[in-house]
């Protein structure tokens, strides 16, 4: 579809996400998730039986920063926005998650309260597992416990590395890195339409991910569109030239 100004558009129907959670969907996303991938079918079914299925409407919070942390979640369908409050009172987006990705916290894993707020970007289906049930899963599958330890260590290392990189990076570099990060987790190859991100991503959302301001991000995005590196609409962004975007993301 082409807009009146000649730019290509993607019909809204193509980016509307279902949010039903039948068993094949649940097992499929568990098989791709960070802690449960590689488990055999029977083990995944036991994990699934311990999960509670939640349907979350768009813009509804799953939990808020400061609330007691007692569960982990896996996105089965939809998109989730993870955000944190700043000292100035503003809200900054730190991550956008899609199917198969995990979020949440548990006091037994060192987080007595949630440090961030999780909100559904679109109507979403989540799988929730509580602390006791998760302990049972780790007892039955020791590899899950090892992955938890590895994940916690990787998060700490990544946070330290990101702090150093972001402090010296230009806005263009930070925007490019944010787009590439989303592409790696949520991107869908649409051929001539590029790598499509089916995410209703506002400039404020992208500004949070890039640790910049909406105005600065808008200027960078406009420049990238003019150069044919990306295209975007109200509820989607498409990466048309990943090689160039990777060049823009590199340290100078």
Image (tube, helix red, strand yellow):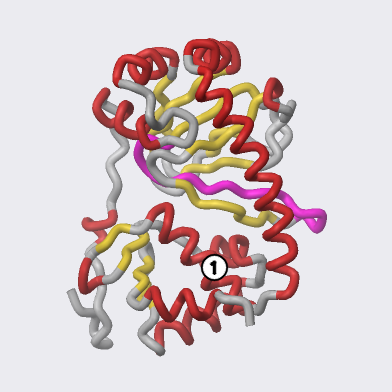
- The residue depicted at 58 percent of the width and 11 percent of the height is 132
In the image, the segment drawn in magenta is: 75-89
Which residue lies under the disc numbered 1? 177
Label 1: how many residues lie within 10 Å, few (<14), some (14-19) or many (20+)?
many
Q: In which quarter of the image is residue 197?
A: bottom left
- The residue depicted at 62 percent of the width and 61 percent of the height is 208
Q: Quadrant of residue 231?
A: bottom left
Residue 3 location, x and y as percent?
A: 24, 80
Residue 178 location, x and y as percent?
A: 53, 64
Residue 235 location, x and y as percent?
A: 37, 62
**Which residue is situated farthest in the left direction here?**
1
- Main SS category, magenta section: strand
Of residues 157 and 50, the one nearer the viewer is: 157
- The residue depicted at 55 percent of the width and 28 percent of the height is 72
Which quadrant is home to the N terminus? Answer: bottom left
As drawn, is 68 to the left or to the right of 177?
right
Of residues 7 and 102, the one nearer the viewer is: 102
Residue 51 location, x and y as percent?
A: 43, 19
Q: In which quarter of the image is residue 13?
A: bottom left
**Which residue is situated farthest in the right direction here?**
87
């Amino acid at each position: 579809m082409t807009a009146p100004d000649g730019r290509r558009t993607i019909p809204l129907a193509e980016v509307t996400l279902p949010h039903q959670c039948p068993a094949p969907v649940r097992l499929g996303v568990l098989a791709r998730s960070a802690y449960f991938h590689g488990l055999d079918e029977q083990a995944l079914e036991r994990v699934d039986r311990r999960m509670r299925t939640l349907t979350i409407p768009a813009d509804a919070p799953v939990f808020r920063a400061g609330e007691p942390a007692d569960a982990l979640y896996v996105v089965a369908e939809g998109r989730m926005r993870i955000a944190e409050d700043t000292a100035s009172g503003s809200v900054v987006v730190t991550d956008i998650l899609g199917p198969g990705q995990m979020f949440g916290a548990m006091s037994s894993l060192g987080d007595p309260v949630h440090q961030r707020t999780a909100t559904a970007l679109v109507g979403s289906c989540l799988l929730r597992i509580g602390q006791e049930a998760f302990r049972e899963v780790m007892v039955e599958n020791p590899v899950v416990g090892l992955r938890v330890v590895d994940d916690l260590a990787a998060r700490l290392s990544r946070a330290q590395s990101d702090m150093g990189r972001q402090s010296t990076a230009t806005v263009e570099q930070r925007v490019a890195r944010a787009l590439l990060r989303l592409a790696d987790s949520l991107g869908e190859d649409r051929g001539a339409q590029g790598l499509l991100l089916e995410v209703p991503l506002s400039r404020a959302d992208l500004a949070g991910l890039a640790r910049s301001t909406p105005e600065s991000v808008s200027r960078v995005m406009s420049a990238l569109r003019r150069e044919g590196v990306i295209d975007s609409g109200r509820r989607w962004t498409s990466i048309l030239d990943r090689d160039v975007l990777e060049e823009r993301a590199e340290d100078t």
